[in-house]
Image (cartoon, rainbow, N blue to C red):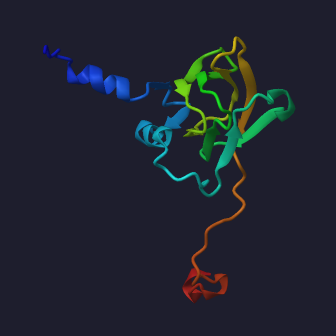
Amino acid sequence: MFRRYVPREKILSRLIPQFDYDPYFIAFRSWTATLSLEGTIPYETRKDETVLFLDEDTQQSGIERLAVRKPVCLRNPTRFTLLNVTIVRSEGGRKVFFAQELPAGRFLHLEFLKEDSYTLHYSPAFGPITLHRAIQTFTPEQTHRFEAGNFHSGLYPKWYR
């Protein structure tokens, strides 16, 4: 019986999914994505998280409006693997995120860092079509100003007034 030597780097590169992203536009943690693709992270949504279902009804969704620096979950609810999940910046056509595949029933977490217009492209496996989804990011207004619980505006010292 012969044993073939396979370098450790080659073995690990096959097990870890390949992701490509621009850190100036997208915040993405590959170790969390690897766990979520394996299904070891719970399926609950986080607080203030927006979920984008990557299904075949893209015409009905219209333009998705997402807040900057808020978590976004890309979910694949279909029975098929999605291939070439790509986010392209509309201005200039620059690719800011690329995942080779998103398995059926799995999800990816990421955040948009800059206010801009994007287009999400993905194609179902075993199909010759590419689906598109428009994304518009915006900076949310700060509605709540933090004040300490023990602060009162009438408690300034007399010398301060």
Q: Where is residue 64 drawn, in percent x and y?
A: 77, 36
Q: Where is residue 79 drawn, in percent x and y?
A: 65, 32
150 with respect to 51 (left or right): left
Whether residue 42 can be seen here: yes
Whether residue 138 can be seen here: no
Q: Name the residue located 50 percent from the left edge and 26 percent from the top edge.
A: 21
Q: Where is residue 59 drawn, in percent x and y?
A: 84, 27
User: Residue 33 versus residue 144: which sits nearer the camera?
Assistant: 33
> How many numbered tags mark residues here?
0
Instruction: Residue lying at the far top in this picture: please name it.
Output: 128
User: Which image quadrant: the C terminus?
Assistant: bottom right
Q: Where is residue 84 drawn, in percent x and y?
A: 58, 19
User: Which image quadrant: the N terminus?
Assistant: top left
Q: Name the residue located 36 percent from the left edge and 28 percent from the top edge.
A: 15
Q: Name the residue located 54 percent from the left edge and 25 percent from the top edge.
A: 101
Q: Is residue 2 above or below residue 53?
A: above
Q: Is residue 141 above or below residue 139?
A: below
23 with respect to 113 (left or right): left
User: Residue 73 versus residue 95: which sits nearer the camera?
Assistant: 73
Q: Name the residue located 73 percent from the left edge and 21 percent from the top edge.
A: 131
The answer to which image quadrant residue 44 occupies is: bottom right
Q: Is residue 30 above or below residue 11?
A: below
Instruction: Residue lying at the far front in this picture: please name it.
Output: 1
